[in-house]
Amino acid sequence: MQKVKALQADTSDFSSFHQIVIERRTLHPDDVAIDIKYCGICHSDIAQVEGIGTAFQHPVVPGHEITGIVSAIGSDVTEFKPGDRVGVGCFIDSCGKCKYCLAGQEQFCEKGFVSVFNTPDYDGNITQGGYSQSVVVKQHFVLHIPDNLSLSLAAPLLCAGITTYNPLKRYGINGNSNIAIIGLGGLGHIAVQFARRLGANVTVLGHSESKRSEAAQFGASNYEILQDENDFDRLSNKYDFILNTAAVKLDLDNYLKLLTVNGIFCFVGLTMDEQQFNIFSIFDKQGTITVSNVGGIAMTQEMLDFAAKNDVKPKIEMISIDDVPSAYQRILDSDVHYRFVIDMSTLK
Ligand code: ZN
Ligand code: ZN
């Protein structure tokens, strides 16, 4: 056992965050120990602290956008060595035997994957996440961070990156694609970059002028403001793929007008509010409404390599560990450009 410092929330009140000492397990033969340098703050961290969703409990040490340096390896580890630059994303174990694990889709493991924080590990211990000095993870679930990608910028890719890259790949977005992305926040600003680098013509759909120039900086060819019915009518039958990154209830019937025949509308921004639509909004054009989960480990590594090669860079605001409660509030107030990353050296 190794004792390490961490940041824990005792209740759903952000002011309950405080530093504690937690234990990381002694290395199993296939384990990698990682000194955590940075951890991104994801919306789902906040949901877990607030107790929104299905599985949650307090206290909680959140964090699933982890990057750092390998400090030690177990005797059977072949893929990593001390000093390697690595990352850990949303999950840290799965059965490894079911058809989904064998297909590299560990996120759908029949036994249930083990989240990096706030779920029972297969040994029964509750997992504790990346707001800490170190973590011990089975080597299969550790990612290589390419040399030309900084550890701080790589952190948000471990959740926001793979969440947006996965559907773009799954639906074959390429140079022939004319796509729209709803929302230009933590997910959206990375989605625009990936879609552009995959060759797509990208339009960002927003509500105000304020993000027009930033959308262009990230690679969007167009920026459209949708305020009333006329705006939706003007853009009808235009996009063969729409990625919704906004975690709000949408006027879905209006957005579905924008799809081409056989067009796909995919949710990655999630809200507990019900999303409603009329079936005839997709009937005439045989549209598809779908969602995308995170990606598997192999896809996550592919995403990191693609990001490094194609200069996809999250735009981050670095914060200290003491800033976490106020950062949570700022995310809820949509006051973040575009992802908070915690400098873990401030955990003292
Ligand atoms: Zn996340
Ligand atoms: Zn499995």
Image (cartoon, rainbow, N blue to C red):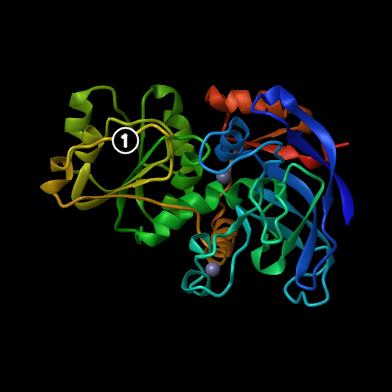
x 58%, y 33%: residue: 51
x 43%, y 45%: residue: 268
Quadrant position of ligand 1: top right
Crowd class of label 1 (few under 14; some 14 to 19; many from 20; radius 10 Å): few
In this picture, residue 79 sits left or right of residue 188: right
Is residue 198 visible to the viewer in this orientation of the structure? no
In this picture, residue 276 sits left or right of residue 7: left
Residue 141, x across and y down, in percent = 65, 64
Q: Nearer the viewer, residue 149 or 182?
A: 182
Residue 272, x across and y down, in percent = 42, 34
Displayed quadrant of residue 279: top left
Quick one: SS at disc 1? loop
In this picture, residue 90 sits left or right of residue 1: left
Asked if the beta carbon under badge 1 is closer than 8 A to the nearest atom of ligand 1, the reply is no
Q: Amino acid at mark 1?
A: Gln
Residue 282, x across and y down, in percent = 17, 45
Q: How many marks?
A: 1
In this picture, residue 288 sits left or right of residue 98: left
x 70%, y 39%: residue: 60
Q: Nearer the viewer, residue 80 or 45?
A: 45
Check the image and name the residue furthest to the left: 284
With respect to residue 217, does 283 lie above or below?
below
Residue highlighted by disc 1: 275
Q: Nearer the viewer, residue 81 or 72?
A: 72
With respect to residue 77, does 192 lie above or below?
above
Q: In which quadrant will I find the C terminus?
A: top right
Displayed quadrant of residue 22: top right
x 60%, y 34%: residue: 46
Residue 178, x across and y down, in percent = 29, 50
